[in-house]
Amino acid sequence: MAATHSCFILDAERIRNRINELSDVLEDCVNQGASVSFVFPFGREKSLPFWTAVAEGVAGGERIVLAAENGAGVIIGTVQLLLDQPENQPHRADVAKLLVHSSARRSGIARRLMEMLEICAKQNHKSLLVLDTATGSGAELFYQNCGWQKAGEIPEYAQMPDGTLTGTTVFYKYL
């Protein structure tokens, strides 16, 4: 069966115009327990400023935001490629905030977003990508299945949304 979703790049204006959809995805992921930099309580008072800052970063050329939408044209997933790196690291980029709404998981959206992200990275002359994720999470296995190499783990690196500490696993991938 053919996929019923499409993936595309969001410019700053499209982020601002679709900020509520993006906030819905972020809020769903955080409130489902995803360790993506936020803690409870989490709602529009945190998600709107986050996406506003992301739009500014896109406008400044610091990052690329990819989105996936369902057949009804609603955003159900997103990921970011952070291009703004120190002068001695022009060959690499960070991957951040791979988010898929809980209602759309296990349908290939995350994998498609990551494939598009790698294409964007190559188009921006990046040969090395780096990311981190909560140790023991489903995301950790996902990245391994997508060909990412585990660099190591840092115990008690960050808090989960409920405040408990979690380790972080760092991954890299050569393009």
Image (cartoon, helix red, strand yellow):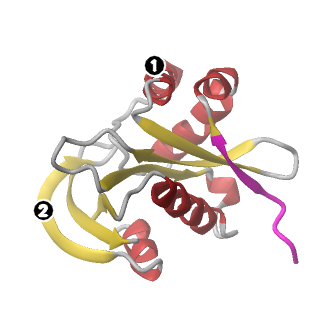
Q: CA distance from mark 2 to mark 1?
A: 29 Å
Q: Which mark is residue 49?
A: 1
**Quadrant in which the N terminus is drawn:** bottom right
- Judge left or right: residue 55 versus residue 134: right
What's the residue at 66%, 69% (across, down)? 108
Q: Which mark is residue 40?
A: none
For the residue carrying disc 2, how many other residues have a C-alpha within 10 Å: few (<14), some (14-19), or many (20+)?
some
Q: Nearer the viewer, residue 156 or 117?
A: 117
Q: Nearer the viewer, residue 6 or 63?
A: 63
Residue 44 is situated, as x and y percent measured from the top left of the image, at 53, 22
Residue 86 is situated, as x and y percent measured from the top left of the image, at 19, 41
For the residue carrying disc 1, how many other residues have a C-alpha within 10 Å: few (<14), some (14-19), or many (20+)?
few
Q: Amino acid at mark 1?
A: Pro
| Earlier sequence position, callout 2 versus callout 1 | 1
Q: Does the stretch in magenta take in 86?
A: no
- Judge left or right: residue 89 versus residue 116: left
Q: Nearer the viewer, residue 113 or 27?
A: 113
Secondary element under disc 1, as helix, strand or loop, is helix
Residue 29 is situated, as x and y percent measured from the top left of the image, at 51, 47
What's the residue at 20%, 48% (across, down)? 158
Q: Amino acid at mark 2?
A: Ile
What's the residue at 58%, 25% (across, down)? 12
- Magenta range is 1-9
Q: Residue furthest left?
A: 155
Residue 172 is situated, as x and y percent measured from the top left of the image, at 29, 68
**Quadrant in which the C terminus is drawn:** bottom left
Vertical position of residue 54 compared to residue 79: above or below: above
Does the residue at mark 2 contact the one at mark 1 (Cβ under 8 Å)? no
- Judge left or right: residue 93 versus residue 5: left
Q: Nearer the viewer, residue 142 or 123?
A: 123
**Which residue is under mark 2?**
154
Q: Does the stretch in magenta take in 7?
A: yes
